[in-house]
Image (cartoon, rainbow, N blue to C red):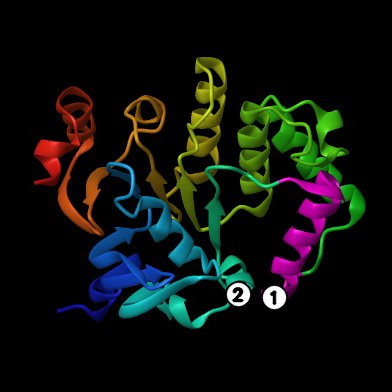
Amino acid sequence: MNPDILESNMLKIENLHAEIDGKPILKGLNLAIDAGEIHAIMGPNGAGKSTLGYVLGGRPGYEVTEGTVTFDGQDLLALEPHERAAAGLFLGFQYPVEIPGVSNVQFLRESLNAQRNARGEKPLSGGEFLKLARAEADALALPQDMLKRPVNVGFSGGEKKRNEMVQMGIIDPKFAILDETDSGLDIDALRVVGEGINRIMRRPDKAVLLITHYQRLLDYVRPDFVHVLADGRITRSGGPELALELEREGYAEAAA
């Protein structure tokens, strides 16, 4: 068997167990995602969807007790959060945090250049960065004056999500984990964000893990695979039609 085929997964999760404050949340989760794919994880509240995103991103307080996660051939769990980011992983939050006193431009430029430095790449100049930031803001219908404002301070829910997509466009990750990106969005904002995800991440060398409750985001970002997460494990997988079935019939049947 060709060894390149064996290592083709961009992300491979095997028998992942994780807990917070001693309470088991993930209980033997398995998942493989290849470059060029978009996977959606759906499931009821408390199933472990956000915990999976936090564990992959390296959020403190979430302890992995068993299992392995390989990202682009590396042991992801051995990397610090900033090393995971430099390796190409991006985590979008359900509730993006506010950072008073730090402008969007300052935050994004420092973030991007820190990652470029970690990869041995030349940092962008102020002019180069502003050109990139303005182009991304325009593409996501984010007013450019918001680039000068403190990160997410005074932003509406939709503006925070668009701002996060601007961040993703600037950082240009290999793999994006988007936790309930559709939360709090009206129809117009949902369309803009969905188009942004497709424009930035729908490429042969990238992959996306969408964590969502609802089908509506998947109308704009069509997944290749849909998985049901229940009680800390993936209990069922299928194509885009599975999301429609879940919308019609609920999780109880699919999670059984």
* Towards the viewer: 210 or 29: 29
Where residue 5 sits in the image (x, y, percent)? 24, 71
Q: Are marks 1 and 2 in contact (CB under 8 Å)?
A: yes
Q: Which mark sits nearer the N-terminus, 1 or 2?
A: 2
Compared across the picture, whether 155 is left or right of 61 comes to: right
Q: Nearer the viewer, mark 1 or mark 2?
A: 2
Q: Tell me which corner region of the image, top left, top right, bottom left or bottom right, holds residue 114.
A: bottom right
For badge 1, the amino acid type reads Ala
Question: Within the magenta stretch, is there residue 111?
Answer: yes
Compared across the picture, whether 158 is left or right of 54 comes to: right
| Image point (67%, 29%), residue name | 159
Dot 2 corresponds to which residue?
83
Dot 2: few (<14), some (14–19), or many (≥20) neighbours within 10 Å? some
Dot 1: few (<14), some (14–19), or many (≥20) neighbours within 10 Å? some
The span picked out in magenta is 98-121
| Image point (35%, 36%), residue name | 213
Question: Within the magenta stretch, is there residue 228?
Answer: no
Q: Tell me which corner region of the image, top left, top right, bottom left or bottom right, holds residue 28.
A: bottom left
Where residue 172 sits in the image (x, y, percent)? 61, 52
When the figure is inspected, residue 25 is found, relative to residue 81, above or below; the finding is above
* Towards the viewer: 18 or 6: 18
Where residue 113 sits in the image (x, y, percent)? 77, 64
| Image point (91%, 53%), residue name | 126
Where residue 163 sits in the image (x, y, percent)? 68, 37
| Image point (29%, 72%), residue name | 17
Dot 1 corresponds to which residue?
118
Compared across the picture, whether 145 is left or right of 85 comes to: right
- Estimate the spatial distance between the alpha carbons at disc 1 and disc 2, rounded to whole Å: 8 Å
Q: Quarter holding the N terminus?
A: bottom left
